[in-house]
Image (tube, rainbow, N blue to C red):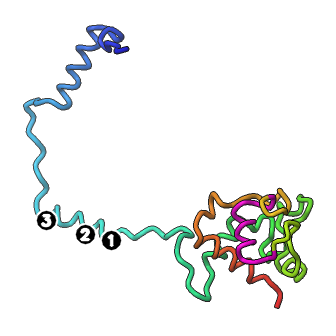
Amino acid sequence: MKTNWMRLIGAPAAAALLALAVGCGGDSGAEEPKEAPAAEAEAAPAAEEKTPEPTPAPEAKADAGDNELGKTLFSTYCVSCHGESGKGDGIAGAALNPKPASFGDAAFWDGKSSAGDARTDDHLKKVIKEGGAAAGLSPLMAPWGAVLDTDEKLDAVVAYVKSFKPE
């Protein structure tokens, strides 16, 4: 059903809107703005070129042997439960039962999940991406796949978690 907007607002208001529209976009007899002189036109792009690029978010590719991406992502999403040192001693983890996994504990790496999965990279990725319940672990381990949404991010976090593994 079409609605006539002039009937809704009334003829005087419609006329005022029409006059306003013509005044703003129509030929008012005013002189068009002149183009900037060539010197000013050239100076503007130079100013834009000097604008520094924003620092990339933790999307940057981690260099081989250097896992700053994994450390950044772990610090952002995992520390509150697993702690800075990966021992399951984060502030939020203190209130959880069962406690978050301690990546510095050899028993964590030697053990298997209740679903029978070994602590392989694929197992760790599944737990991180889909949450603990998806791998037969605690449902308190939240799924992080919405924010760790690329293989690069997941691989970086898994590599960082593995850096806590005792030798």
What kind of residue is marked 3?
Ala
Q: Residue furthest front?
A: 116
Q: Secondary structure at mark 1?
A: helix
Q: Residue at x 26, y 19 (%)?
A: 17
Q: Quadrant of the C terminus?
A: bottom right
| Other residues around mark 2 within 10 Å, as few (<14) / some (14–19) / many (≥20) | few
Neighbour tally class for label 1: few under 14, some 14-19, many 20 plus, Cα within 10 Å? few
The one nearer the camera, 130 or 91, is 130
Confirm or deny contact between disc 2 and disc 1 (CB under 8 A). Answer: yes
**Mark 1 → mark 3, Cα distance in angstroms:** 17 Å
- Amino acid type indicated by mark 2: Ala
Q: Which mark is residue 151?
A: none
Circle number at residue 39: 3
| Residue highlighted by disc 1 | 50
Mark nearer the N terminus (3 vs 2)? 3
Under tag 3, what secondary structure?
A: helix
Q: Residue at x 45, y 67 (%)?
A: 54
**Rendering coords of residue 11 (x, y %):** 26, 8
Identify the image quadrant of the N terminus.
top left
Q: Which quadrant of the view contains residue 141?
A: bottom right
Give, as a single range, the part of the protein colored magenta.
Answer: 118-133
In the rendered image, which residue does mark 2 sit on? 46
